[in-house]
Image (cartoon, helix red, strand yellow):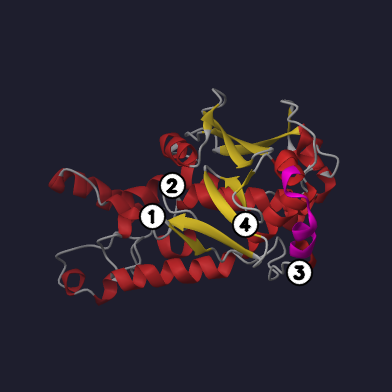
């Protein structure tokens, strides 16, 4: 079956049957390279979908690319309804899963514990802001989430209105941070995950979830810069591209990207301030990396 990187089955296309048009083939195929060369020669530019898949070593966008559906599919070849369905179901399939792919459950007592906390002390320890006598504003990834302690809900402002946020991982992480953040300040001493006291945790199913970021930006550092800056990231002048991304006020994450070339594969590292374990447990650190990685890939649309 001659299926292109975009997902079109060329075998059922009359142009292909008549020999007028050849299949683009998977992004990694010889056909893809040949088709790209012909497109440049005849049209002056390649298909942006095929060019992206080929440059990133992706066979099929729908199956292999964590960034699908991206802006390249806004007008072709799928309908708006199909794209929105893909976005909705992909989000539902991933946002509520823990490292072992089990459904995330937010313990009710996390909200009960938060209700009991003294608001001024809570704001002092977390570097968050009181919105009312009960509600608190939590800075997250360059934006703000309103935490409604009375109604046990998260809200995000859109077009001047506070609308509900349904994202189990985000809810769990915010509650863990608010309930556990202490008076400790940032040390400015950066460490890798292996240097954390709980470094042994991050193995097997608990390895840091950065594969989608590497796949999306491993050969596109400029795209990585734009994505990181859209999340409030600050350039660190390290590696080929490196940014300090504000997860929570006391929990920044440092993403360092080395671009791949013909000799070396691209790679990415995540560093933490040594104080992170004073505010988050090991599984919450894993979850925050997963959340930030998803946000980087999904920008400009955040996953929540």
Residue under pointer 1: 27
Do labels 1 and 3 touch, CB within 8 Å?
A: no
Mark nearest the camera among 4 and 3 is 4
Label 2 secondary element: loop
Query: In the image shown, does 238 or 115 lie closer to the viewer?
Result: 115
Q: Position of residue 250 (x, y in %)?
A: 69, 38
Q: Earlier in the sequence, mark 2 or mark 4?
A: 2
Residue under pointer 2: 56
Q: How busy is the neighbourhood of tag 4: few (under 14 within 10 Å), some, or many (20 plus)?
A: many
Q: Earlier in the sequence, mark 1 or mark 3?
A: 1
Mark nearest the camera among 2 and 4 is 4
Q: Position of residue 19 (x, y in %)?
A: 16, 67
Alpha carbon distance from label 2 to label 1: 8 Å
Mark nearest the camera among 1 and 3 is 3
- Residue under the image location 33 percent in, 68 percent down: 2
- Residue under the image location 39 percent in, 45 percent down: 55
Q: Residue furthest bottom?
A: 12
Do labels 4 and 3 touch, CB within 8 Å?
A: no
Alpha carbon distance from label 2 to label 3: 43 Å
Q: Which of marks 2 and 3 is nearer the N terminus?
A: 2
Give, as a single range, the part of the protein colored magenta: 111-120
Alpha carbon distance from label 1 to label 3: 46 Å
Do labels 2 and 1 touch, CB within 8 Å?
A: yes
Residue 90 magenta-drawn? no
Residue under pointer 3: 108
Residue under pointer 4: 147
Mark nearest the camera among 4 and 1 is 4
Label 3 secondary element: helix
């Amino acid at each position: 079956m001659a299926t292109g990187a975009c997902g079109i089955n060329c075998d059922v296309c009359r142009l292909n049957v008549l020999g007028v048009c050849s299949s683009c083939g998977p992004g990694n195929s010889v056909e893809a390279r040949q088709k790209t060369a012909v497109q440049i020669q005849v049209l002056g530019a390649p298909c942006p979908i095929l060019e992206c898949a080929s440059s990133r070593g992706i066979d099929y966008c729908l199956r292999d690319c964590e960034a699908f559906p991206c802006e390249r599919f806004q007008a072709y070849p799928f309908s708006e309804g199909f794209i929105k369905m893909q976005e909705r179901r992909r989000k539902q399939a991933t946002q509520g899963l823990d490292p072992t792919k089990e459904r995330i459950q937010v313990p009710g007592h996390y909200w009960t514990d938060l209700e009991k906390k003294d608001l001024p002390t809570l704001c002092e320890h977390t570097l968050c802001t009181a919105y009312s006598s009960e509600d608190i504003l939590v800075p997250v990834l360059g934006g703000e989430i309103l935490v409604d302690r009375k109604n046990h809900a998260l809200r995000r402002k859109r077009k001047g209105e506070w609308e509900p946020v349904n994202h189990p991982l985000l809810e769990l992480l915010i509650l863990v941070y608010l309930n556990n953040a202490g008076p400790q300040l940032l040390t400015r001493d950066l460490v890798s995950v292996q240097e954390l006291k709980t470094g042994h945790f991050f193995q097997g199913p608990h390895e840091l979830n950065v594969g989608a970021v590497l796949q999306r930006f491993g050969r596109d550092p400029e795209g990585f810069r734009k994505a990181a800056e859209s999340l409030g990231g600050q350039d660190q002048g390290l590696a080929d591209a490196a940014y300090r991304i504000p997860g929570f006020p006391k929990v920044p994450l440092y993403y360092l990207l080395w671009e791949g070339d013909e000799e070396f594969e691209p790679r990415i590292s995540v560093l933490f301030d040594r104080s992170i374990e004073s505010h988050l447990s090991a599984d919450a650190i894993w979850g925050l990396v997963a959340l930030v990685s998803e946000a980087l890939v999904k920008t400009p649309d955040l996953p929540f």
